Amino acid sequence: MEQDKTFYLEKVKEQLTEPRYQHTLGVMETAVKLAERYGADTHKAELAAILHDYCKYWKQDKLEQIILETPHIPDDLIDYGVELWHAPAGAEVVKRDLNVTDEEVLDAIRYHTSGRAGMTLLDKVIWMADYIEPGRDFPGVDEVRKLAESDLDQAMLRALDNTIMFLIQKGKKIYPRTLAARNDLIK
Ligand code: DGI
Ligand code: FE
Ligand code: FE
């Protein structure tokens, strides 16, 4: 059975640092607003936002083990940035440890870092809320905030462009799903 919001907030607080918990609250508020604006399920948006960074501070070897033992997580994720691992691993852990069964919520958690081709409205709401929550302060974020007031897909495209350019500047690998998420938004 699904628990109430305070249960999940307490559980996730145990997993995070205080600043990361504050980030989570920012994502939660922003996700609910975006869900209202674009007609996504506000309850699912709230739950996915609360749990999206559940495994952010889990040790690398634990995340690697979850990825390798979960059949539907591609093993090649291990060849890309460790920053990507907490998202798909987190979805498995909240399913296993917190009994979250809603696959739409789990997908939104799973793809909140990379995105994917064919993102659902809920996927986009969580991805975007993570990018623009009030605590975020990096170049280009205000432009994306503005776009997200009227056009979620344009905001997604701009934000993915920023992310990909940032990763290139840092000399990092781009995960194919991140590129697929961007390409899918170009008509
Ligand atoms: O967990 P958060 O910090 O709230 O945000 P997030 O889950 O979106 O993670 C952001 C990090 O993920 C940031 O350092 C960039 C990185 N990232 C996103 N897409 C890719 C990526 N890293 C690599 N190497 N490749 C990607 O495609
Ligand atoms: Fe994250
Ligand atoms: Fe986050």
Image (tube, rainbow, N blue to C red):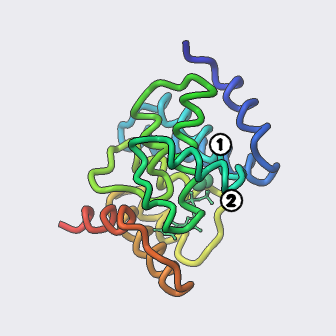
- Residue at the disc numbered 1: 54
The reply, left or right, for residue 34 in relation to residue 89 is left
Judged from this view, the residue extending furthest toward the top is: 1
**Residue 12, image x and y in percent?**
71, 37
- Relative placement, left or right, of 105 versus 83 is left
Quadrant for residue 179, please give it: bottom left
Position of 144 relative to 118 (above/below): below
The image shows residue 5, relative to residue 68, as above or below, that is above
Q: Secondary structure at mark 2?
A: loop
Mark 2 Cα-neighbour bin, 10 Å: few <14, some 14–19, many ≥20: some
Ligand 1 near label 2 (Cβ, under 8 Å)?
A: no
Q: Amino acid at mark 1?
A: Tyr
Where residue 135 is drawn, which disc sits there?
Answer: 2
**Position of 156 compared to 12: left or right?**
left
63 or 19, nearer to the observer:
63
Q: Position of residue 57 (x, y in %)?
A: 72, 52
- Please give the name of the residue rendered at 50% of the width and 42% of the height, measured from the top-left corner: 69
Q: Is residue 131 above or below residue 13?
A: below
At 23% from the left and 68% from the top, the residue drawn is 186
Query: From this viewpoint, which residue is outermost toward the right?
Result: 18
